[in-house]
Amino acid sequence: MYTQDNFLSIFLPIKFGKGHVFMIRLNAEQLTVNRDASSKLNYSLYSLSMPIGLQLQSKNEKWKFLGTIIPKLNSDFADNLNYDMQIGGIGLVTRVFNPKLQVRLGAYYNSEYWGPFILPLVGVDWKVNDKFRMYGTLPSNYRFEFKLGKKMYTGLGFRSFQRSFRLQAKYDDDFVRIRESQLKVFFEGFVVGKILIGIDLYRTLGYNLIRYDYFDTKTEKSGLPVFTKSKDAYGLTLNLAYRIRTD
């Protein structure tokens, strides 16, 4: 099986007051699956989401409170999108110990097609020294980053994510559940101004795309299009971003 995942994200933070931030993001994804077997498959799944969040900072600057609502469309975009809407959100509380260390706790929720999905979150952002820092939120995304020069970075990363896509009425409105975990080595650098180019070399850990019955969300569904468990493999991700670093 071969998969290609194209992802676009536009993030706009707007600061106001003393340390408060209003945030809006637009995410778009196209996941194309190609399978060479007795039942050939070339099928695309799509996602559009617009997370809207507000981060408030305490007067003593030791606490931050983040709330985000995430409306999302996840499907093959082949018929009535009214059935494709998901609503999710993130809540995080961050304790800022000093400019180099902060710890956060919270939770993620989304109304997946298999039912409510709740995921506890914990994060530690720690700038150990001028060359090494670690940051992210587990279990979704975490990085150990090493600075190679003024504009070059490398390190190790972990990513884990679950999501679901509804199939069209032609396929009984069933859904595909994707479980995705990656262990990666990354290299990235600023080439012109704030334009950053990066490459991730990763190994999947239990990656699979499985089709489930619309009425019985625990029963795997056979028939075309075919989505089944996949063997773990190595992969490559290319990144292009406009990024403003604060370190």
Image (cartoon, grey):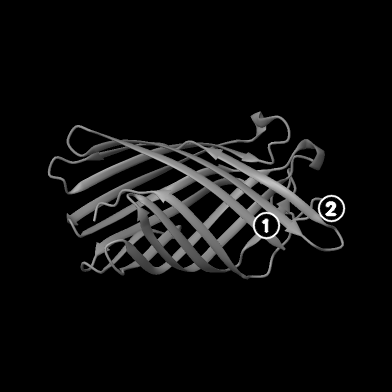
Location of the N terminus by quadrant is bottom right
Q: Residue 209 carries which label?
A: 1
Q: What element carries label 1?
A: strand
Q: Is mark 2 on a helix, strand or loop?
A: loop
Question: Farthest residue in the front direction?
Answer: 192
The percent coordinates of residue 22 (x first, y second) are 32, 34
Residue at screen point 37% across, 44% down: 91
Asked if residue 145 lies left or right of residue 198, the reply is: left
Residue at screen point 63% across, 43% down: 46
Asked if residue 196 lies left or right of residue 225, the reply is: left
Q: Looking at the picture, does residue 16 appear above or below residue 180?
A: above
Asked if residue 62 lies left or right of residue 44, the reply is: left
Question: Farthest residue in the left direction?
Answer: 60
Disc 1 marks which amino acid? Answer: Leu
Q: Dot 1: few (<14), some (14–19), or many (≥20) neighbours within 10 Å?
A: some
Asked if residue 193 lies left or right of residue 199, the reply is: left
Q: Would you name the residue on which mark 2 appears?
A: 223
Disc 2 marks which amino acid? Answer: Gly
Q: Dot 2: few (<14), some (14–19), or many (≥20) neighbours within 10 Å?
A: few
Q: Nearer the viewer, residue 12 or 205?
A: 12
Question: Farthest residue in the right direction?
Answer: 38
The percent coordinates of residue 80 (x first, y second) are 70, 29
